[in-house]
Every structure is written in C-alpha cells, then in structure tokens.
C-alpha cells in the first residue's frame, strides 16, 4: 500500500504526537537520569570516605534497577581496599 505525501506526513505527526509514547519515553529517560545521579552520589560518598553511606546508597540503587548489578564487583573490590588503606593510615 503506497501512501501519499499528505498521508505519510499525517501518519508521522499522529505517531510523534501520541501522548502515551511521549509520556512513557520521557519518564523512562528521566528515571535513568535519576538513577545515574544516585550512582554518582554513591561514588562521591565513597570518595569522601563515607563507605557505609556510599554502600547503602548503592544498595538502594540496586533495588531501583538491577542493571547496576554489573558494578557490584567494583564496589566489593574497591570499598574494602579503600577502607583497609584508610584504617592503616589512621592507625599509624
């Protein structure tokens, strides 16, 4: 079925102005932006040597979206090392 130019333009306008698609797409990307903000907050807390607070924030992030489970290896490797190094520096 061949559409005329007017029909093609009308179809494109109808699809692009579909409110459900706009809401779902917009909410999805805003949600991911919020999650990346929580990830950065967790990393910043760890860099400020608030290890427990950073781990709690990361745990909350994992509960919000499971895709961040890939970073758990970094957290389980980096946080204990930083904590041990800091503990040795403060003990001496």
Image (cartoon, helix red, strand yellow):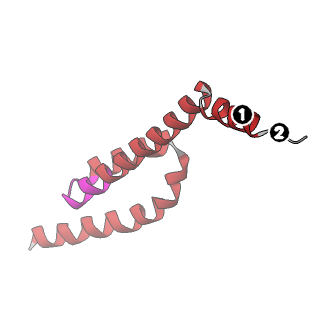
- Which secondary structure lies at badge 1? helix
The residue sitting at 30% across, 57% down in the picture is 43
Please tell me how crowded label 2 is: few (under 14), some (14-19), or many (20+) other residues with Cα within 10 Å. Answer: few
Asked if 43 appears above or below 63 in the picture, the reply is: below
Q: Magenta region: which residues?
A: 42-51
Q: Looking at the image, which residue is at 82% across and 39% down? A: 3
Between marks 1 and 2, how big is the CA–CA gap? 10 Å
- Residue 18 versus residue 61 in the image, above or below: above
Closer mark to the observer between disc 1 and disc 2: 2
Left or right? Give the position of 7 relative to 19.
Answer: right
Q: Residue at x 72, y 33 (%)?
A: 11
Rate crowding at label 1 as few (under 14), some (14 to 19) or many (20 or more) other CA atoms within 10 Å. Answer: few
Taking the magenta stretch, the answer to whether it contains residue 49 is yes
Q: Which residue occupies the extreme front position in the image?
A: 5
At which x and y percent is residue 92?
8, 74
- Mark 2 lies on a secondary structure that is loop
Along the line of sight, the residue nearer the viewer: 38 or 6: 6
- Residue assigned mark 2: 3
Marks 1 and 2, the one that precedes in the sequence: 2
């Amino acid at each position: 079925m061949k559409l005329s130019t007017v029909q093609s333009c009308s179809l494109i306008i109808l699809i692009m102005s579909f409110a459900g698609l706009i809401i779902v797409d917009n909410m999805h990307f805003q949600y991911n932006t919020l999650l990346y903000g929580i990830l950065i907050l967790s990393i910043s807390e760890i860099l400020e040597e608030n290890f427990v607070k950073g781990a709690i924030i990361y745990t909350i992030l994992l509960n919000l979206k499971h895709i961040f489970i890939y970073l758990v290896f970094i957290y389980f490797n980096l946080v204990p090392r930083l904590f041990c190094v800091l503990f040795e520096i403060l003990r001496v």
